[in-house]
Image (spheres, rainbow, N blue to C red):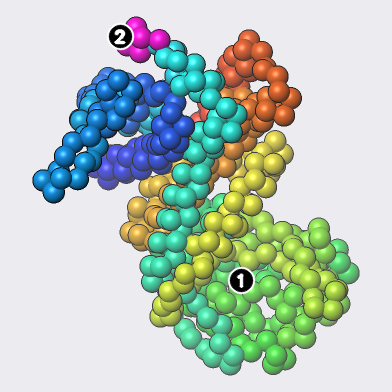
C-alpha cells in the first residue's frame, strides 16, 4: 500500500513540476500574442476539456464601445467571450504540454488559418527566445521558492563547541546535503550510523594507507561526541574513540594545523590534489552492507595568498538540540546546486560521472526516500532539486530542448537569415531519438543497480 501511495505522490509532484514549466511557455506565449491550441495536464485519454471565458472590450466599426454609468461617466463596454486555448486534464499524470501555432500547425479546429504574426515562428526572435526560456525560468523560480521555504523550516544541527563533550545514545542523520558524498551513496535523514572507518590514500610523504579510527575493523559508533578544542594538543590515540565526531574528522588537516600528533610513520604527511578520503560505513538502512564513499580533496586559499588542500566532508549533520531559522540558505543552496549540476552534466561521459547519473527510477527512489523521512523541509528541498534539474537540463543547447530552440533563434537573429526548416526538423528528430535512448539507458542502469 505504501508503494502505491509513493507512486501516486511521485507522479503528481512530477506532473506539477513539468506543468509549471509548460505554464511558463503558455503565459509568455499569450503575452506575445502567439495563438495556443491547448494546455494539457497529463497525457492519454481526455478527462476534462474546456475553453475558459474572459472579458474583453466590445469593438464596433473598429472602435471601442462605451456605455454610461449611473453617475453619467462613460466607461468601456465589456463582454464575456470564450478563450482560444483549450485547457485539458488527461488520464495519465506524466507531465503536460502546451501546443502553439507554428509549432503544431497553423489552423484552428474549425479550419480557420492563423495569421503568421500570431505563430511561434512568425513573431520576432526576442519573443521566441522569451517564450522558450519562460519554462526554464519557471522551474528555476519554483526551485528557489521550495529551497527558500525549506530553509525557513526549523532544523536541528550540530555545533562543535570548544572543550565541550555532548554524547547521544545513537547517531541519527538529521540533514544530508544535496550532491554531497553522503547523498550520492544513498544516505538519508533518519538513518543511523552503526559502524564506520575511513582511510586516506595518496598522502604526500608516505606510500602507506592511513586508517582511522581502526584498521579495517568494525568500529561500532556508540555516540555523537563533539570534537575537542583543536587548539589543544591531542594525540592520535586521543581521537580513536567510537564516536562520530572523531571518526569523521579530517584529522590530517587538523594535524597539519598543530591540533593533534600523528603516528611516527605519518608525521609530516600532506594532503595533495590527488589524495582520496575513503569512508566505509554501515547504517540502520543497510546493516549488512558496507557503503563506500570516496571524497576528493579541495583547495583552501588563505588570506596571505597561499593555499593548502583539505578533504571534502561526508555531508551529514548529526542530531542535537539546536534549532535555527535562515533566510539566505535557500538562495545559497540554489546557487551551489546550479553550479554542481552543470559540473555533473559535464562529466556524464566519464566513468565516475556516468556512475552518479540516474533516470526516472532514481528520481522515484529519491522521492520515496524523502517521504520516508517525514521531513517536510527535506521533501521540499528534494523537489526543488528536481525542478532545478529539469530547468538546467532544458537549458542545454541540445536538439529537442528549449536551449536548442533558443540557440537557433539567436543564430537567426545575429545572421539575419532563416535556417533551413528541413535542417531544424532533422536536428529535432535526431535529438529526440537520442534523448529517448538516453532515458532508456538510464532506466536499464537503474534496474541493474536495483537487482
Whether residue 238 is situated above or below residue 213 in the rendered picture: below
x, y percentage for residue 50?
A: 23, 25
Whether residue 190 is situated above or below residue 49 in the rendered picture: below
Residue at figure coordinates x 31%, y 27% from the top left: 63
Q: Say which residue label 2 marks.
A: 110
Judge whether residue 272 can be spotted in this image. Answer: yes
Determine whether label 1 and label 2 are within 8 Å by CB: no
Q: Say which residue label 1 marks.
A: 248
Give the magenta range. Answer: 108-113
The answer to which of 123 and 61 lies nearer the viewer is 61
When asked about the image quadrant of residue 237, the answer is bottom right
The N terminus sits in image quarter: top left
Judge from the rendering whether residue 180 lies leftward or rightward of residue 414; answer left or right: left
x, y percentage for residue 350?
A: 72, 39
Judge whether residue 282 can be spotted in this image. Answer: no
Magenta segment: does it hold 110?
A: yes
Residue at figure coordinates x 28%, y 26% from the top left: 59
- Cα separation, mark 1 vs mark 2, equals 69 Å
Amino acid at each position: 500500500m505504501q508503494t502505491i501511495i509513493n507512486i501516486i505522490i511521485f507522479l503528481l509532484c512530477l506532473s506539477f513540476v513539468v506543468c509549471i514549466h509548460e505554464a511558463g511557455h503558455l503565459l509568455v506565449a499569450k503575452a506575445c500574442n502567439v495563438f495556443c491550441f491547448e494546455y494539457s495536464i497529463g497525457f492519454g485519454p481526455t478527462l476534462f476539456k474546456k475553453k475558459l471565458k474572459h472579458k474583453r472590450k466590445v469593438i464596433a466599426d473598429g472602435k471601442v464601445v462605451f456605455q454610461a454609468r449611473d453617475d453619467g461617466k462613460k466607461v468601456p463596454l465589456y463582454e464575456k467571450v470564450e478563450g482560444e486555448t483549450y485547457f485539458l486534464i488527461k488520464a495519465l499524470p506524466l507531465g503536460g504540454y502546451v501546443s502553439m501555432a507554428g509549432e503544431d500547425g497553423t489552423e484552428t479546429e474549425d479550419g480557420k488559418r492563423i495569421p503568421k504574426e500570431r505563430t511561434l515562428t512568425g513573431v520576432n526572435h526576442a519573443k521566441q527566445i522569451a517564450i522558450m526560456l519562460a519554462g526554464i525560468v519557471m522551474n528555476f523560480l519554483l526551485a528557489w521558492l521550495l529551497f527558500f521555504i525549506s530553509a525557513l523550516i526549523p532544523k536541528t544541527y550540530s555545533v562543535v563547541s570548544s572543550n565541550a563533550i555532548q554524547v547521544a545514545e545513537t547517531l541519527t542523520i538529521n540533514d544530508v546535503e544535496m550532491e554531497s558524498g553522503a547523498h550520492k551513496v544513498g544516505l538519508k535523514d533518519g538513518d543511523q550510523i552503526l559502524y564506520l572507518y575511513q582511510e586516506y590514500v595518496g598522502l604526500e610523504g608516505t606510500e602507506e594507507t592511513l586508517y582511522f579510527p581502526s584498521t579495517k575493523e568494525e568500529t561500532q559508533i556508540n555516540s555523537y561526541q563533539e570534537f575537542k578544542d583543536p587548539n589543544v594538543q591531542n594525540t592520535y590515540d586521543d581521537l580513536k574513540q567510537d564516536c562520530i565526531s572523531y571518526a569523521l574528522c579530517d584529522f590530517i588537516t587538523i594535524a597539519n594545523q598543530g591540533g593533534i600528533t600523528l603516528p611516527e610513520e605519518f608525521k609530516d604527511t600532506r594532503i595533495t590534489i590527488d589524495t582520496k578520503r575513503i569512508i566505509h560505513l554501515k547504517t540502520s538502512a543497510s546493516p549488512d552492507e558496507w557503503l563506500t564513499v570516496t571524497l576528493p580533496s579541495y583547495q583552501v586559499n588563505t588570506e596571505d595568498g597561499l593555499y593548502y588542500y583539505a578533504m571534502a566532508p561526508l555531508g551529514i549533520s548529526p542530531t542535537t538540540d539546536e534549532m535555527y531559522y535562515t533566510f539566505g540558505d535557500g538562495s545559497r543552496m540554489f546557487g551551489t546546486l546550479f553550479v554542481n549540476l552543470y559540473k555533473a552534466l559535464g562529466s556524464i561521459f566519464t566513468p565516475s560521472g556516468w556512475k552518479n547519473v540516474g533516470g526516472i527510477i532514481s528520481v522515484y527512489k529519491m522521492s520515496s526516500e524523502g517521504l520516508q523521512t517525514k521531513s517536510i523541509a527535506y521533501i521540499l528541498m528534494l523537489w526543488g532539486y528536481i525542478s532545478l534539474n529539469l530547468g538546467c537540463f532544458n537549458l542545454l543547447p541540445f536538439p529537442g530542448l528549449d536551449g536548442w530552440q533558443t540557440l537557433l533563434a539567436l543564430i537567426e537573429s545575429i545572421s539575419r537569415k532563416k535556417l533551413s526548416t528541413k535542417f531544424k526538423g532533422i536536428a529535432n528528430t535526431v535529438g529526440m531519438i537520442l534523448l529517448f535512448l538516453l532515458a532508456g539507458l538510464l532506466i536499464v542502469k537503474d534496474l541493474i543497480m536495483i537487482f
